[in-house]
Image: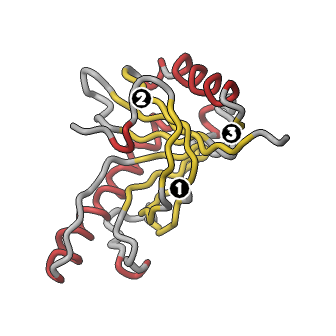
Amino acid sequence: MALPFGVRQKPALVEMPAQTMAVVRSVGDPNLVGAQVFPALFGCVFTLKFKVLRPRGIEFKVGPPRARWPLPLETPRDEWVGLWGIPVPDDIGIDELPQTVPDVAVGLETWEYGTMAHILHIGPYADEVPTVARLREFIAAGGYEIARGHEEEYLSRPEAKQMRTIIRYPVRPLPA
């Protein structure tokens, strides 16, 4: 599988365009709330693909899910705020998003990107700390600072033998 935006296990900077996302918001430990989020998010996006857009002749590839963690990673896990998303075509309207899981709303947002620092983490989520530290060191050494929260893109399922996760931060040059 080709990795998006040329990501590797070595930190790098990349320019990414804004993307329209189907999004579910959550509060709590990601290991627990993910069980509610993923059925709603994937149910919405696959229903959108096959029952709403395909009959109109519109095709799109469902990409891997992403999550944004706007609070500091030191926040207790049961207080984490998660923004879970999957890219969808730009011309989708909120009224076209099928709500497939009761009590778990899927919304529509534009996620801004721009200059991003990213790295590929291979292994369990619990072992990401050294990878995140390497990425943060790369950002600082390059004369940048983190502009906002942590984002992850999940390239494999949680039960995969070799889990692969892209870790990224939006960055901006340090003030002169």
Q: Amino acid at mark 3?
A: Ile
Q: Residue at x 56, y 20 (%)?
A: 129
* In this view, 139 is above or below 15: above
- The answer to the question of whether label 2 and label 1 lie on touching residues, with beta carbons closer than 8 A, is no
The quadrant holding residue 162 is top left
Task: For mark 2, give the secondary structure.
Answer: strand
CB atoms at circles 3 and 2 under 8 Å apart?
A: no
Identify which residue is drawn at 31% across, 38% down.
3
Residue underneath mark 3: 146
Query: The N terminus lies in which quarter of the figure?
Result: top left
Density class for disc 3 (Cα within 10 Å; few <14, some 14-19, many ≥20) is some
Question: Residue 55: x, y in percent?
Answer: 14, 80
- Helix, strand or loop at label 1? It is strand
Left or right of 146, for residue 103: left
Q: Nearer the viewer, mark 1 or mark 3?
A: 3
Q: Amino acid at mark 1?
A: Arg
Residue placed at 50% from the left, 61% from the top?
Answer: 18
User: How many numbered circles are shown?
Assistant: 3
Q: Is residue 51 left or right of residue 164?
A: left
Mark 1 nearby-residue class (10 Å; few <14, some 14–19, many ≥20):
some
* Position of 61 relative to 147 (above/below): below
Residue identifier under label 2:
120
Task: Name the N-terminal-most of marks 2 and 1.
Answer: 1
Q: Where does the C terminus fall, quadrant-wise?
A: top right
The reply, left or right, for residue 23 in relation to residue 63 is right
Tell me the element at label 3.
strand
Q: Which residue is mark 1?
A: 25
* Residue 116: percent from left, percent from top: 55, 43
Circle 2 residues within 10 Å: few <14, some 14–19, many ≥20: many
